[in-house]
Amino acid sequence: MTGQQVVDVVVPAALRFLLPGRDRSAGMRRLRFDPDATVGHVVQAAGVPLTEVGGLRLDGVPTDPRARTSPGSRIEVTEAARPESPPGGGFVLDVGLGALARRMRLLGLDVAWRNDADDPDLVARAVAEDRVLLTQDRRLLMRRALPRGALVRGSRPDDQLADVLDRFSLDLAPLTRCTACGGVLDPVPKEEVAHLLEAATRRTYDEFVRCRACRRVYWHGAHARRIRTLIEHARMFSPPAGAGEPNRS
Ligand SMILES: [Zn+2]
């Protein structure tokens, strides 16, 4: 490719893991100029979903994803600012993020998750319920119909949770959501659920909550230490700059 028939995409250190391995140390990907491609198309062709992008400059001038490039253009990308506010409807999580979904629900976040949702289902739910889609599949984030999405960093669920808590400003309300289905938990008198409890639980605990949707019963003692550990881990965590998607090397 000669100099005038290319477009360069320059990405900051935090997003270099999205580039092909050979381009990561330079933090730049060179693509063939395409007169029909917008800035947004070119950035995503370089491997970076627009959900991960904060600002864009085209040949030194702030621009937006719909702008057109020229032969020899240079596009500079900045990382999406943290923390961002989530939409009113909460989150919808990709199929592979079930362990993250349970942790987020434990902290009281509104999380939709099913183990059998396909890509169109996930996008449709994000649109219909004003949710932000969390996934580790960057192609899914590049779907045009998706209003809000985020690429979850980290391969271990605790690291993924820490990344989500770092990325979004969230009000945590532990033990207000069912970890199994995401339903709202209401206080329930002990005598109503006593027959469902093991003897040791019945002796030890007096305060119980029950899921409005699936009727599971919870008590505080069982989860208190787990919640403390999750939040402490999240506070110590900073998102990995290079260790991103487990499904890409
Ligand atoms: Zn439930």
Image (cartoon, rainbow, N blue to C red):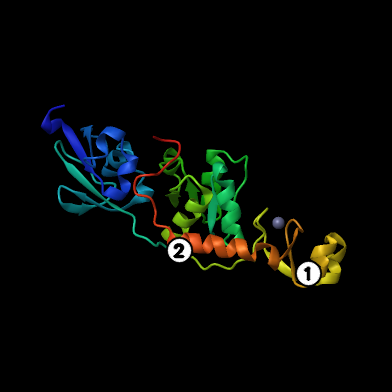
State the SS at label 1: helix
Q: Is residue 243 left or right of residue 106?
A: left
Decide if residue 214 is in sight here.
yes
What residue is rendered at 15% in x and 31% in y?
5
Q: Is residue 189 left or right of residue 16?
A: right
Left or right of 118, for residue 211: right
Query: Disc 2 residue type?
Result: Arg
Q: Residue at x 33, y 42 (%)?
A: 17
Give coordinates of residue 170: x percent, y percent: 49, 65
Q: From the viewer's perspective, is residue 118 above or below residue 237?
A: above
Residue 87 visible to the viewer: no
Q: Which numbered tag is attached to residue 204?
A: 1
Quarter of the view holding residue 238: bottom left
Mark number, residue 91: none
Callout 1 crowding tier (Cα within 10 Å): few <14, some 14–19, many ≥20:
few
Percent from the top left, x then y, of residue 248? Answer: 41, 35
Q: Is residue 140 above or below residue 236?
A: above
Q: Residue at x 21, y 40 (%)?
A: 26
- The amino acid type, in three-letter code, at marker 1 is Thr
Residue in the foreground of this view, choosing between 76 and 208 = 208
> Residue 49: x percent and y percent?
36, 44
From this view, report whether residue 107 is shown above or below residue 147.
below
- Image quarter where the C terminus lies is top left
* Percent x, y of residue 229: 55, 61
* Label located before the other in sequence (1 or 2): 1
* Point 32% across, 47% down: residue: 15
What SS does tag 2 mark? helix
Mark 1 or 2, which is nearer the eye? 1
248 and 109: which one is in front?
248
Q: Is residue 130 above or below residue 141?
A: below
Q: Depth check: give the residue in front, 181 or 199.
A: 199
The residue wearing badge 2 is 235
